[in-house]
Image (cartoon, grey):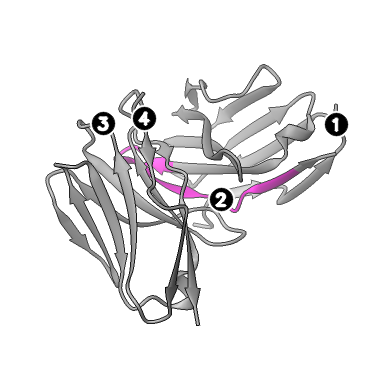
Amino acid sequence: DAGVIQSPRHEVTEMGQEVTLRCKPISGHDYLFWYRQTMMRGLELLIYFNNNVPIDDSGMPEDRFSAKMPNASFSTLKIQPSEPRDSAVYFCASSQRRDPVRAFFGQGTRLTVV
Amino acid sequence: GESVGLHLPTLSVQEGDNSIINCAYSNSASDYFIWYKQESGKGPQFIIDIRSNMDKRQGQRVTVLLNKTVKHLSLQIAATQPGDSAVYFCRGPDNYGQNFVFGPGTRLSVLP
C-alpha cells in the first residue's frame, strides 16, 4: 500500500479564498483523522471519522472549517473563507478498527494564506 | 482537564550517547501510550507503544518505561545517531478516553 496520500503538498492562497485539502486513507482502515500542526499549538486533532461517519468534530476551529468523507477511500477538509491564521501543516491519518490509536500519517499539506 | 504534557521542549545529546525523552500524564485510567517520531517535513511515525499492564517495552535501540505510580513515561534511545534528530511525541487519552491526543513534543538534536 502507498500509505496515506494527501494533496496538494503545498497550497498558497489569498485570504478569503476557499481551500480544499484532500486525503486518501490506507485501504481497509476504518478511522480517518485530520490534524493541524503549528509551532504555537502543536499537533491538534480537528476531526475524526469512523466508517465514514464523523465522530468527534470538537476540534474544528469554527464554522469556516468543514470535513467530509463521502466514501471509505476519500476525505476532504475545506476552509471557506480562509484566513492568514489558518496557515499551518494539515495532516491526515488513518488507522484500523483493531488498533485505532496506532495511526499512519500522510506527508501533510502545508497551507499558507496570505 | 486531563492532558498529556512534556517536561522538556528541546533536548541536545552527543552522537553515541543515550537519549531520554520524558512525558507526564494526568489520567490515572490511561491504559495505552504510543511514541511517535516526526522528522522534518514528514508526518509523525509510530515508534513503539506500551500498555498499562507493562512497565517496560523494548524495541530496536528504543525502550519505553512506564511508571504508573507517578504517571510518567519515558522513551530511551540507545547510542543516539544523527538520524534520530526529530520531534518526539507521546500520545495518550484525552478527556473522553480516546487515545487520539498528542502532547506538545520534544525536539531531539544530535550533536556531532
Please report contact status of discs 2 and 4: CB closer than 8 Å, yes or no. Answer: no
**Picture coordinates of residue A25 (x, y %)?**
52, 43
| Marks 1 and 3 close (CB-CB < 8 Å) | no
Residue A69 location, x and y as percent?
57, 28
| Three-letter amino acid code of the residue under disc 4 | Asp
Residue at image location 78% in from the left, 45% down from the top: A11
- Left or right of residue B110: residue A111: right
Q: Nearer the viewer, residue B53 or B112?
A: B112
Q: CA distance from mark 4 to mark 1?
A: 33 Å
| Residue at the far top in the pictured view | A63
Decide: is A62 above or below A82.
above
Q: Amino acid at mark 3?
A: Asn
Q: Chain of mark 4?
A: B
Q: Chain of mark 3?
A: B
Q: Is residue A112 left or right of residue B99?
A: right
Q: Which label number is shown at residue A15?
A: 1
Residue A101 in the magenta stretch? The answer is yes
Q: Which residue is mark 4?
A: B94
Residue ID at (70%, 51%) = A9
Whether B112 is among the magenta residues is no
Q: Label 3: few (<14), some or many (≥20) within 10 Å? A: some
Marks 3 and 4, Cα distance to the nearest angstrom?
8 Å
Pick whichever of labels 3 and 4 is earlier in the sequence: 3
Most common SS among magenta residues? strand
Disc 4 to disc 1: CB gap under 8 Å:
no
- The amino acid pointed to by label 1 is Met
